[in-house]
Amino acid sequence: MTDALATEWFTHSRFGLFLHWGLYSIPARAEWLKTIQKMRDEQYDVYFREFNPTRYDPHAWAAMAKQAGMRYAVLTAKHHEGFCLFDSQHTSYTSVHTPAGRDLFREYVEAFRAAGLKVGFYYSLLDWHHPEYTIDRHHPLRDLAPDDPERTRRSLPKYVDYLHAQVRELLTNYGKIDLLWFDFSFDDKHSDAWRATELVKMVRELQPWILLNNRLTLGHADTATQNNALGDITTPEMAVPAEGIRDAAGKPIAWETCITLNDHWGYTRDDHHFKTPAQVVRMLVECVSKGGNLLLNVGPTAKGVIQEEATAVLLRVGDWMEANHDSIYGAGPAEMPKPDWGRYTRGEDGTLYAHVFERPMGPIAFHGLAGRVKRARFLADGSELVLNKPWNVPKNSHDLHVDLPEAPLLDELDTVIALHVD
């Protein structure tokens, strides 16, 4: 594992952008289409011959991510379909050989670096296009007879040679990469099957500073105790762990949950069920309050555009982040019970941040903080809040009360109160 100093940028960032993009953006029915429809290569590869994202502008993607308050990004260099957004000497199944005619991954790396964002890539351990990848329960050809030559001729070790060679390319040809996101192990395809120890050694030698997720091993979606023997960060999916994640000794470890902005990872034309800005902010706050990160996913279209609906949500989140980012960047658990009205985070300087999601009846009560808070301010505008002890509170109460304005909360997404604790 990488030492704690190497994970500092990650635990400070707290908010990242996940980008699922590939050939599946053309049929626009999500990224597992090939296996759901049990499509053969000759059926699916019509999309390869058509792929030409004429409106792809990674600088616009990076600007949007930065405006949303995100500090890093992860792009699918290769998803389960096997198509590569990068140039490779080991296959022609890449964006360079489509009508696009160029290395789209390089453009992403350069644009996000130029914007000052950390750069990561996703690489699928699965590959439904490679002729040596063995047919398993997820494979589009899973219904073939056990003795079918198409099934029996395949060699997973030969495919793993290809996997290692492509990871070497990605870590050699694109400069510094900050985060490598493998996906995913299952059944007997994990650890030794991927020659994971050898793979990780190569990764560490090529880019010693890089962070690895934990999906070379089983249990990637488990939110219980993790050891991360082959990785640096634990990656639950589509859920926020109940109480954060700790190692076997009970020590908190770095983690990141990945969640879709609508209901799918890859572009799905008919999915307009986007989360609201309030839902996104509150998910992010929940992650930070438990010591974790949020990697929020969008799926660009076949033309290379991030949908207006997604952009609108992210820009509203960015407005909130602009005013309240001190309660997110570098913040973490407050080690206080969860209040009825929202959540707490604690900043790097010890400031306690109260994230008020629901306006309580009367003054807001901060349990156990009586006599400990020097001042209270709305984080967004710095305005003072009055500390008091209402007449109807028992004299021996340790609760601190703060009067809220008669008007609605400053921000319907999340009103943050900075409590400067003695």
Image (cartoon, grey):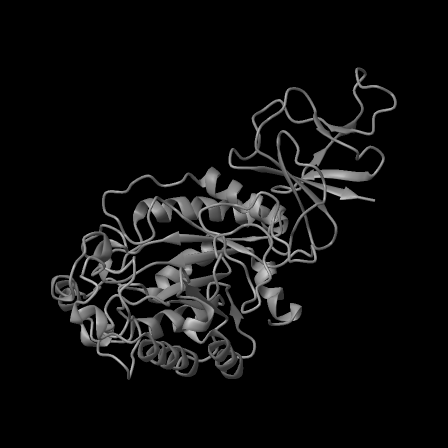
- Please report the residue visible at 64 percent of the width from the left and 54 percent of the height from the top: 246
296 or 65: nearer the eye? Answer: 296
Q: Is residue 42 above or below residue 337?
A: below
Q: Is 75 positioned to the left or the right of 336 in the image?
A: left
- Please report the residue visible at 48 percent of the width from the left and 65 percent of the height from the top: 117
Q: Is 295 positioned to the left or the right of 304 in the image?
A: right
Q: Residue furthest top?
A: 392
Q: Can residue 115 be seen at all in this image of the molecule?
A: no
Q: Is residue 268 above or below residue 211?
A: above
Q: Position of residue 31 (x, y in %)?
A: 28, 55
Say how many tags the image has. Answer: 0
- State which quadrant residue 184 falls in: bottom left
Viewport quadrant of the N terminus: bottom right
Q: Position of residue 162 (x, y in %)?
A: 33, 79
82 or 342: nearer the eye? Answer: 82
Q: Residue furthest front?
A: 147
- State which quadrant residue 55 falls in: bottom left
Viewport quadrant of the C terminus: top right
Q: Is 176 positioned to the left or the right of 110 in the image?
A: right
Q: Can residue 19 be seen at all in this image of the molecule?
A: yes
Q: Position of residue 120 (x, y in %)?
A: 45, 68
4 or 148: nearer the eye? Answer: 148
Q: Position of residue 299 (x, y in %)?
A: 32, 54
217 or 201: nearer the eye? Answer: 217
- State which quadrant residue 330 falls in: bottom right
- Please report the residue visible at 45 percent of the width from the left and 40 percent of the height from the top: 277
Q: Is residue 264 above or below residue 131?
A: above
